[in-house]
Image (cartoon, helix red, strand yellow):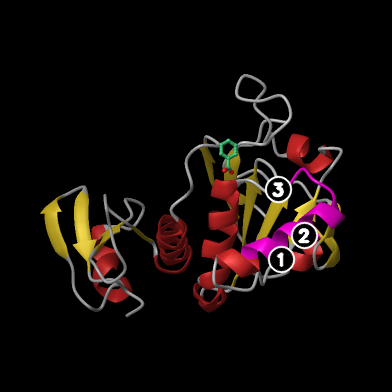
Amino acid sequence: MTLRLGDIAPDFTAETSEGTINFHEWSGNNWAVFFSHPRDYTPVCTTELGAVARIKGEFDKRQTKVIAISVDPLDSHAGWIKDINETQNTTVNFPLIADPDKTIANLYDMIHPNASDTATVRSVFIIGPDKKIKLQLTYPASTGRNFAEILRVLDSLQLTANYSVATPADWQNGQDCVIVPAVKDEDIPAKFPKGHTVIKPYLRTTPQPNL
Ligand code: BEZ
């Protein structure tokens, strides 16, 4: 199934390392990050799950739940999680979906046959509280993801959702934001009381509004 930004993230019920989960119910009114791993007991995936577990508090601060998927069964996940805890200096503290028949992987188009017939690519979906897909990323199996970038995108998405701002290239939390084109010049002072700068009529910036 081809999924696009703005589509409703398909719902599913799955067996996970933390019990049976219905995805939409589980995410509730939160944001969600849903990411796939090629297989259990693979080296890059091991480091990725450890990395996410170590920064889980950062997702919590952003009202964001995280969930991973790997196309192996639950008993395999249980053994692999022990290895991750042992080697990555952490405790895996979010659910890992078991998807041995690849139903969910196919639902989210996580298997790219020209890359591999059997393993998922490294997909990331960020899903809003409205259940709509806000971001998707696809990495090859050989490249571990940068989860600081996922947090950065979450910050940007949440600023846009709450304050009518966008974020410029290479933006980092704390830096100036761009006022979205839909905001009329005359509405800027009331909407952005911290001030604003007009660099060009179409390029207007303001200090980050939520600080
Ligand atoms: C890994 O997760 O380590 C991995 C999986 C497939 C190919 C290369 C690396």
Measured as percent of width and height from the top left, residue 141 is found at 55, 37
* Span of residues in magenta: 70-84
Lower sequence index among marks 3 and 2: 3
Res 31 seen here: no
- Determine the residue positioned at 62% across, 19% down: 114
Q: Residue at x 59, y 42 (%)?
A: 123
| 171, 45: nearer the viewer | 45
Q: Is residue 211 left or right of residue 128?
A: left
Q: Residue at x 31, y 68 (%)?
A: 173
**Residue at point 72% right, 57% down?**
80
Q: Return the disc, 3 or 1, that comes first in the chain's sequence.
A: 3
Q: Secondary structure at mark 2?
A: helix
Residue 85 placement: quadrant: bottom right
**Residues tagged 3 and 2 counted as in contact (Cβ below 8 A):** yes
| Residue 59 point in image, percent of width and height | 54, 71
Q: In the rendering, which numbered label is found on residue 79?
A: 2
CA gap between label 3 and label 1 equals 12 Å
Mark 1 belongs to which amino acid?
Lys
Q: Secondary structure at mark 1?
A: helix
Residue receiving disc 3: 40
Q: Quadrant of ligand 1?
A: top right
In the image, what residue type sits under mark 2? Gly
Q: What main secondary structure does the magenta stretch of the protein show?
A: helix
